[in-house]
Amino acid sequence: MSGIGMHIITYKELRLKNEFVPLMDQAFSWPFNPQKREKIIKIDPRLKDSPVGYCAVENNQVVGFVGVMDLATRTLDGSIELAGGIHGVATLPNHARKGISTTLIQRAHQYFQEQGYRFSFLNTSKYLIAFAYYQKLGYKIAIEFPSAYKILQKTNESKTAENGKKRLDWEKILEIYNQCSAKKTGFVVRDKGYFKMLEKSGDIQPETSIITKMGYVFLKERKETILVQEIISPTIDEANKLIDEVEKKAQTIVIDRVVLDNKIFQAYQSRGYMVLNRSYGVLMVKPLRKSATFQQVYGDKFYRSEADDF
Ligand SMILES: CC(C)(COP(=O)(O)OP(=O)(O)OC[C@H]1O[C@@H](n2cnc3c(N)ncnc32)[C@H](O)[C@@H]1OP(=O)(O)O)[C@@H](O)C(=O)NCCC(=O)NCCS
């Protein structure tokens, strides 16, 4: 990393987080809110015990950032294993191409190695410059995300009014989630706190959630589009019932960008959704030790939903 006086500190050590507003807006069009972020960090099991990330500071200005997370994963043999997660990789435009990101990612890998993690994961898109850069650093595509889209022909556009703040039964939701994900590997290790964090960060909106005896759906409304954040069901029949309810709530378009459960994929397909197997968005993985490959540790059952994005 070039630049006189440039140094690295952790996000937790950084006193004023305001400079993250332009940094995150430039990189991700993310309306970053330092106070809100602070609250989420305290309750997100992936962040609360980590340094949160590494900041490159020059002349008292944050010029680059690489976030780190501790990700609980389930492996093929059923055990829980922590892995590293990289997020929020960003350098200010006038400091780009000076090796800042490379230095920060090396620091992140060092943290993961100190923790004894075997893998580092990150989410990116094949159409970003960063994709080739991550490949150069040893990252490979772990999984792509099948997706489903439907345009609804609604005659009556009036939406059922949602009244008041709905309280969700986290106990029941967790039970359904654990039952349905029991045979899966990947980002399937959750507790009630994880769901509450998702609610606080706005990734789960209780008012639009649908819960049945055996399954549930979390939705996000964006203008006239419904984005499925997570749909969990033990059977195709139940998935169909849930999608029925989703379509009742939706104004015109339903989108599910991460459909890694075969039953759900089949349900969408049978209902005439436009489905894709490949995606630009990908989960990438880099082994931090030579001893094990992603395939050996997680097989082909790796699962995550849109609600596990980072
Ligand atoms: C991706 C990003 C973080 C790189 O930050 P950086 O500090 O400029 O990175 P580095 O200087 O360490 O460059 C690392 C490598 O990335 C690649 N790279 C970076 N910018 C590039 C560009 N404009 N064109 C082509 N390759 C580029 C190069 O391979 C480079 O290595 P090299 O300079 O030795 O050829 C920065 O461009 C950025 O903030 N982009 C917007 C946000 C983003 O896309 N983040 C990643 C989301 S997953």
Image (tube, grey):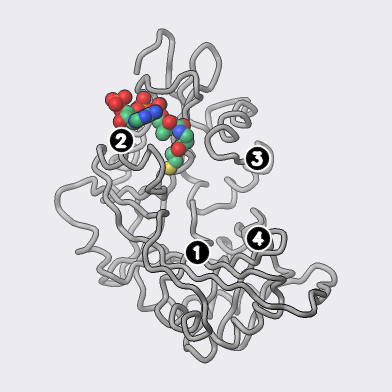
Give the residue drawn at x 57%, y 45%. Answer: 41
Q: Residue at image x 26%, y 71%?
A: 77
Give SS at disc 4. helix
Circle 1 SS class:
loop
Q: Which residue is mark 3?
A: 31
The numbered mark at residue 199 is 4
Mark 3 or mark 4: which is in front? 3
Residue type (three-letter) at the residue carrying disc 1: Arg
Residue, x 38% and y 22% (percent of image)? 97
Q: Residues within 10 Å of mark 1 (few under 14, many from 20)?
A: many
The label number, if any, that marks residue 110 in the structure image:
2
Apparent side of residue 62 relative to residue 145 in the rendered image (left or right): right
Q: CA distance from mark 1 to mark 2?
A: 32 Å
Image height check: is 157 above or below 292? below
Q: Could you give the CA–CA distance between mark 4 and mark 1, rounded to whole angstroms?
A: 19 Å
Q: Secondary structure at mark 3?
A: loop
The label shown at residue 257 is 1
